[in-house]
């Protein structure tokens, strides 16, 4: 059984898959408390669902099980309405059945992304899963929680993300990326500015500033913006 906050269909707003139609499975619960967290509603509550129930809902949103294929179906393929599924949270890796769900989705030819805080070991996931792994910066309030063993568990299809709220965060992310040669370990290193809370609970970082810092230091990273927050209201749920 899994504790699920929501399952919905939207446009992927982050990572190198931004802009693609995607089904999101947001699992309930997180053991971190980042100062700028925009999904605190997923900390508690949710609905108990079996793996079969979760898969059934994904089938409803995707137009049915993905068709059999002799090879890997590229994310965003039009063979089926939506073949891209992301497991997110909260922290999805707090729930053991997240691994089983990923395995079953891949057996049905879905492409699977898992977005995780970086505090849990991602090596428990099937190798084919695209792991989008955060490294928490100092101003998140959860700096130092990244599990360094995760650097051995990622590869050239995976992504490492830093959410950056200040110059201090930027310098941490820059130095961490260089020290651990992240550009050679993963498909993409993502630097994403904190998006200001519309209710004023936290301030954001101007994307222009972050872009200028990246350019000044000639970093081989991708500036990541939360696309969904430009399409819909920043506090909207289920989008």
Image: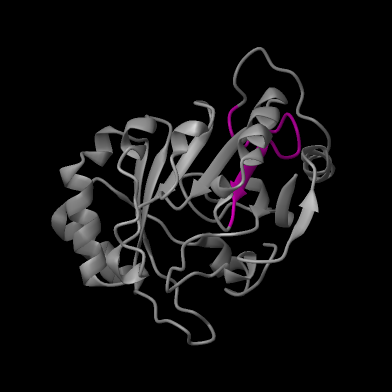
Can you say whether 212 is above or below 20 in the image? Answer: below
Quadrant of the image containing the N terminus? top right
Q: Which residue: 32% across, 37% down?
A: 151
Can you say whether 55 is above or below 202 in the image? Answer: above
Residue 108: image quadrant is: top right
Can you say whether 224 is above or below 40 in the image? Answer: above
The image shows a total of numbered marks equal to: 0
Q: Which residue: 44% across, 61% down?
A: 225
**Seen in the image, is 124 located left or right of residue 109?**
left
Q: Which residue: 65% across, 53% down?
A: 27
**Seen in the image, is 212 located left or right of residue 196?**
left
Q: Give percent across and percent down for residue 126.
A: 54, 27
Q: Give percent across and percent down for residue 208.
A: 31, 70
The span shown in magenta is 74-89
**Seen in the image, is 71 located left or right of residue 81?**
left
139 within the magenta span = no
Residue 59: image quadrant is: top right
81 within the magenta span = yes
Q: Which residue: 51% across, 48% down?
A: 115
Quadrant of the image containing the C terminus? bottom right
**Seen in the image, is 219 located left or right of residue 117?**
left
Can you say whether 154 is above or below 219 in the image? Answer: above
Whether residue 20 is visible: no
User: Main SS type for the magenta part?
Assistant: loop
Q: Give percent across and percent down for residue 97.
A: 66, 39
Whether residue 128 is visible: yes
Q: Give percent across and percent down for residue 42.
A: 63, 64
| Towards the viewer: 211 or 107 | 107
């Amino acid at each position: 059984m899994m504790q699920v906050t929501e399952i919905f269909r939207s446009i992927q707003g982050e990572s190198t898959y931004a802009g693609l139609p995607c089904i999101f499975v947001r699992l309930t619960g997180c053991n971190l408390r980042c100062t700028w967290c925009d999904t605190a509603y997923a900390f508690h509550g949710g609905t108990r669902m079996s793996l079969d129930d979760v898969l059934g809902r994904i089938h409803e949103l995707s137009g049915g099980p993905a068709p059999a294929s002799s090879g890997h179906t590229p994310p965003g393929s039009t063979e089926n309405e939506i073949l891209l599924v992301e497991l997110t949270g909260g922290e999805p890796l707090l729930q053991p059945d997240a691994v089983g769900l990923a395995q079953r989705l891949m057996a049905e030819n879905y492409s699977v992304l898992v977005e995780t805080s970086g505090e849990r070991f991602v090596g428990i996931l099937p190798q084919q899963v695209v792991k989008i792994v955060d490294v928490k910066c100092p101003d998140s309030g959860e700096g130092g929680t990244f599990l360094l063993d995760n650097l051995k568990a990622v590869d050239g299809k995976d992504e490492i993300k830093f959410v950056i709220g200040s110059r201090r965060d930027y310098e941490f992310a820059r130095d961490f990326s260089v020290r651990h040669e992240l550009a050679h370990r993963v498909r993409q290193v993502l630097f994403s500015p904190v998006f200001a809370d519309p209710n004023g609970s936290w301030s954001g970082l101007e994307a222009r500033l972050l872009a200028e810092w990246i350019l000044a230091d000639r970093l081989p990273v991708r500036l990541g913006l939360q696309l969904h927050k430009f399409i819909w209201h920043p506090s909207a749920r289920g989008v």
